């Protein structure tokens, strides 16, 4: 298993969907970033502001990170993840 080291703080947790297929979300206001080693298989997408990752019990989480998207790309490419 490969890991990505990144400083993150949780911004939004998606708990699932309601009867109208609308996301059930929880906004989190963490103040400090924490360093995590994240299994690359958990990554769903990377934007300029967020990493979208899978969590337990079918949850999805948007994590804010404190570096550039280019640095994330370089880290992924360094471990052999193909980025087009």
Image: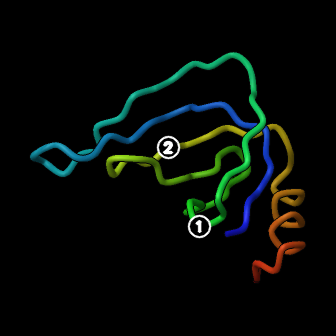
Assess disc 1: are there few (<14), some (14-19) or many (≥20) residues with their C-alpha within 10 Å of its C-alpha: few
Assess disc 2: are there few (<14), some (14-19) or many (≥20) residues with their C-alpha within 10 Å of its C-alpha: many
Vertical side of 37 occupied by 44: above or below: below
Residue 41, labelled with which disc?
1
Which residue is more in the foreground, 54 or 68?
A: 54
Residue at the left extreme? 19
Quadrant for the C terminus, please: bottom right
Which residue is more in the foreground, 41 or 68?
A: 41
Vertical side of 34 occupied by 52: above or below: below
Vertical side of 64 occupied by 80: above or below: below
Residue 25, labelled with which disc?
none
Quadrant for the N terminus, please: bottom right
Instruction: Name the residue at 62% across, 40% down.
Output: 63
Q: Which residue is mark 2?
A: 61
Instruction: Name the residue at 89% across, 57% down.
Output: 71
Secondary structure state at the residue bearing disc 1: helix
Mark 1 or 2: the one toward you? 1
Labels in figure, total: 2
Instruction: Name the residue at 12% across, 48% down.
Output: 20
Q: Position of residue 52 (x, y in %)?
A: 56, 52
Q: Position of residue 30 (x, y in %)?
A: 62, 19
The reply to whether callout 1 and callout 2 are in contact (CB within 8 Å) is no
Secondary structure state at the residue bearing disc 2: strand
Residue at the front extreme? 1
Q: Which quadrant of the structure image shows residue 42?
A: bottom right
């Amino acid at each position: 298993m490969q890991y990505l080291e990144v400083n993150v703080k949780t911004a939004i947790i998606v708990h699932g969907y309601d009867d109208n297929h609308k996301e059930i979300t929880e906004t989190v206001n963490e103040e400090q970033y924490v360093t995590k080693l994240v299994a690359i298989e958990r990554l769903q997408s990377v934007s300029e502001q967020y990493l979208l990752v899978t969590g337990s019990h079918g949850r999805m989480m948007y994590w804010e990170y404190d570096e550039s998207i280019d640095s994330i790309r370089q880290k992924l490419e360094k471990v052999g993840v193909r980025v087009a």
